[in-house]
């Protein structure tokens, strides 16, 4: 078995110091706590705060304890103080192959060595190669366009849907995340006190997660519960709907899977009411299968968006779909043409990374997917054994390499269910405690954990051991 004792993160004294400091307050540990356990991280945060508001460049990275990571390799990340962690955060899920996968790194270095640059004029063979690969393997993508981030891609998908249908209203999911732009920056992890009782059939108000969204725009967006076809129908009967956008599995609040018939039902309603069905597969996409979750579910959206795992950590996103829709980006009538532009679209570095990632995923008859499924199952079985042995009211939700422990007696069917039943405090306490034990689950309750191809059975065994110890400490 691989020993973790050779690293600082699992050195008993360091782990104990971390635990003592980090579990003092579980919801939000104080700055003083973090600086005791991670003095170099604290110093870097202090300096960066002088120039970057809050010290971070993406607000959802602002978590406690404040740790500055300096290196990632395979299944591990290291912080500025030299502590090593088995990483299950995977930077919000892109690292399906593991950090700095050699196949991907080689491809990036090679493309730069060959002198590839950003030309900003015409097309390139490289982007053509990536487009062909995706269209070959993703049934929903008859053709594709490339952008730099998931948010850009979902923004373009919705704009395209509005152009094609001539309608303005859209449906989004409570508990879904589709990016930061005005259409979708709403109703993510809204506390129950704010969302109130379950509404079905019906819709919830737009509850913004950002200031600055025009009120008129909010009127165009209709949040409903996931797994609720009746509410889709209700909203379609009351508004002129251009598109429904949803993750096929809600993976920004753990793992909330579609109930039997739900995705098929969305397809049927899209056809009946004439809206564009957009699957946001930024998280589910290549993590679960080449071809996306849509392929696993045998449901074909009109448009589909990929990001994250498609390039194993490099910034590129894909918008694909039916050719007759995608052709509106080059519509012959200028008034109907949808503007898609971007200085960095299909930059050679992330483009080479995406090609190499897909090639790696295709190698040896899909060994990557077999490996992460095996480890996912092992993690789930182990977790369930531990939860049973400790008589905890908790369940494990999993889709392949992605999993989440919910402290409630059933797997949630939507955000409302989750918000009403989950013990968020216990979830948070587990996550923060694990950090002191050399395991990095992102320290925000309900966030998905991701296993990579680089993780080993020993990593999972060690993780389970630490989870058992942490849970025991919490309930004693
Ligand atoms: C499902 C989903 N869609 C869209 C996005 C936005 O992607 P990005 O952060 O690359 O803009 C995310 C990011 O977490 C996501 O999880």
Image: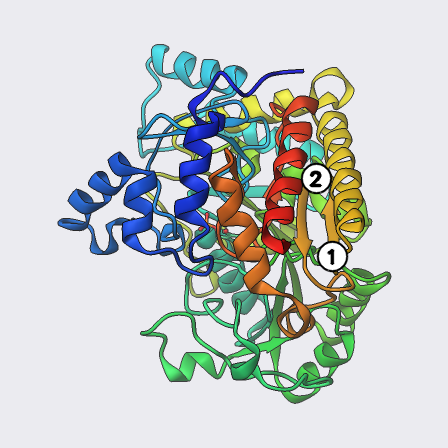
Taking depth in this image into account, of 443 and 32 the one nearest to the observer is 32
Of the 4 image quadrants, the one containing the N terminus is top right
Query: SS for tag 2?
Result: helix
- Distance of mark 1 from mark 2, alpha carbons? 29 Å
Q: Is the distance from the Cβ of mark 1 to the nearest ligand 1 atom less than 8 Å? A: no
373 and 108: which is toward the camera: 373
**In front of the other: 152 or 374:** 374
Q: Residues within 10 Å of mark 2 (few under 14, many from 20)?
A: many
> What's the image's color scheme?
rainbow
- Within the image, what quadrant is residue 467 found in? top right
Measured along the vertical axis of the image, is residue 454 above or below residue 160?
above
Seen in the picture, residue 187 relative to 234 is either above or below; the reply is above
Residue identifier under label 2: 288
| Crowd class of label 1 (few under 14; some 14 to 19; many from 20; radius 10 Å) | some
Q: In which quarter of the view is residue 441 placed? A: top right
Image position of 309 (left or right of 250): left
Q: Tell me the quarter of the picture where residue 261 sits.
A: bottom right
> Can residue 26 be seen from the camera position used here?
yes
Q: Nearer the viewer, residue 470 or 435?
A: 470
Query: Label 2 near label 1: C-beta < 8 Å?
Result: no
| Residue 403 x, y percent position in the rendering | 68, 46
Residue located 73% across and 31% down the image: 375
Q: Nearer the viewer, mark 1 or mark 2?
A: 1
Q: Position of residue 437 (x, y in %)?
A: 51, 36
Q: Looking at the picture, how far across and down is residue 60, in whole percent?
A: 40, 54
Q: Residue at x 54, y 33 (%)?
A: 95
Quickly name the residue at label 1. 392
* Helix, strand or loop for disc 1: loop
């Amino acid at each position: 078995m691989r020993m973790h004792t050779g690293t600082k993160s699992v050195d008993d004294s360091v782990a104990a110091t971390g635990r003592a400091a980090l579990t003092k307050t579980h919801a939000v540990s104080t700055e003083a706590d973090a600086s005791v356990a991670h003095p170099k991280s604290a110093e870097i945060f202090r300096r960066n705060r002088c120039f970057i508001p809050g010290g971070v460049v993406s607000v959802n990275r602002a978590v406690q304890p404040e740790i500055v990571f300096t290196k990632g390799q395979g299944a591990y990340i290291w912080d500025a103080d030299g502590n090593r962690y088995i990483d299950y955060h995977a930077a919000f899920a892109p690292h399906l192959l593991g950090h700095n996968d050699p196949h991907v790194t080689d491809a990036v270095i090679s493309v730069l060595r060959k002198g590839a640059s950003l030309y900003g004029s015409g097309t390139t063979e490289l982007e053509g190669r990536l487009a062909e690969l995706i269209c070959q393997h993703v049934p929903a993508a008859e053709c594709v366009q490339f952008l730099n981030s998931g948010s850009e891609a979902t923004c373009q998908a919705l704009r395209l849907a509005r152009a094609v249908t001539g309608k303005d209203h859209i449906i989004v999911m409570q508990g879904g995340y589709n990016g930061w732009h005005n259409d979708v920056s709403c109703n993510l992890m809204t506390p129950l006190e704010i969302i109130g009782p379950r509404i079905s059939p019906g819709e919830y108000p737009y509850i913004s997660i950002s200031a600055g969204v025009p009120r008129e725009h909010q009127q165009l967006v209709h949040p409903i519960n996931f797994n609720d076809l009746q509410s889709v129908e209700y909203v379609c009967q009351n508004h002129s709907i251009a598109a429904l956008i949803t993750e096929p599995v809600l993976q920004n609040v753990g793992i909330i899977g579609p109930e039997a018939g739900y995705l098929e039902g969305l397809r049927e309603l899209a056809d009946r009411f004439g809206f564009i069905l957009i699957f946001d597969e930024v998280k589910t996409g290549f993590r679960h299968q080449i071809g996306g979750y849509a392929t696993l579910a045998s449901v074909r959206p009109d448009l589909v968006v990929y990001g994250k795992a498609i390039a194993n950590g490099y910034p590129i996103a894909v918008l694909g779909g039916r050719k007759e829709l995608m052709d509106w980006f080059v519509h012959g009538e200028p008034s109907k043409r949808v503007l898609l532009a971007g200085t960095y679209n299909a930059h050679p570095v992330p483009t080479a990374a995406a090609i190499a990632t897909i090639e790696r995923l295709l190698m040896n008859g899909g060994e990557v997917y077999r490996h992460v499924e095996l480890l996912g199952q092992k993690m789930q079985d182990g977790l369930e054994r531990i939860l049973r042995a400790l008589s905890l009211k908790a369940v494990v939700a999993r889709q392949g390499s992605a999993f989440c422990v919910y402290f409630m007696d059933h797997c949630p069917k939507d955000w409302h269910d989750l918000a009403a039943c989950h013990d968020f405090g216990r979830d948070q306490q587990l996550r923060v405690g694990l950090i002191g034990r050399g395991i990095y689950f992102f320290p925000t309750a309900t966030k998905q954990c991701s296993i990579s191809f680089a993780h080993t059975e020993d990593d999972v065994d060690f993780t389970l051991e630490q989870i058992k110890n942490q849970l025991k400490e919490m309930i004693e």
